[in-house]
Amino acid sequence: SVISSSLDEVITRTAPPQLSGWNIFDVYAGKGVEEHQKSVALSLILQDFSRTLSDDEVNRIIDIIVAALHDATGATLR
């Protein structure tokens, strides 16, 4: 889909190596979402094969991805 390919391009370009995969698990447009907008829910698979990631590291990775998606598409975290 257009959404998936746009997100994939941004995520692939900016995500650190600890992101081993991602998936869109919900797309919603309707009550509670601005007209001509969609709410897209993503799951991210983060892992390091040599150690456990800390909460701070995970949050930093998510912040990087959200910022890149915002810059490229105007997406915001709800």
Image (cartoon, rainbow, N blue to C red):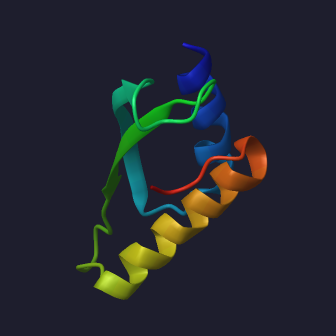
Report the residue at 59% width, 46% height from top.
Answer: 11
Residue 43, percent from left and from top: 32, 45
How many discs mark residues in the rendered view? 0
Residue toward you, 58 or 67: 67
Image side of residue 10 versus residue 21, left or right: right
Which residue is at the far front? 31
Q: 20 above or below 3?
A: below
Q: 27 above or below 15?
A: above
Which residue is at the far left? 52
Quarter of the figure that contains the C terminus: bottom left
Image side of residue 44 versus residue 37, left or right: left
**Residue 31 seen in render:** yes
Q: Quadrant of residue 32?
A: top left
Image side of residue 72 versus residue 39, left or right: right
Q: Quadrant of residue 9?
A: top right
**Residue 54 seen in render:** no
Residue 55, percent from left and from top: 30, 83
Which residue is at the far right? 71
Report the residue at 50% width, 61% height from top.
Answer: 17
Report the residue at 50% width, 57% height from top.
Answer: 77
Report the residue at 39% width, 26% height from top.
Answer: 28
Residue toward you, 8 or 35: 35
Q: 51 above or below 36?
A: below
Residue 1, percent from left and from top: 54, 13
Residue 48, percent from left and from top: 32, 69
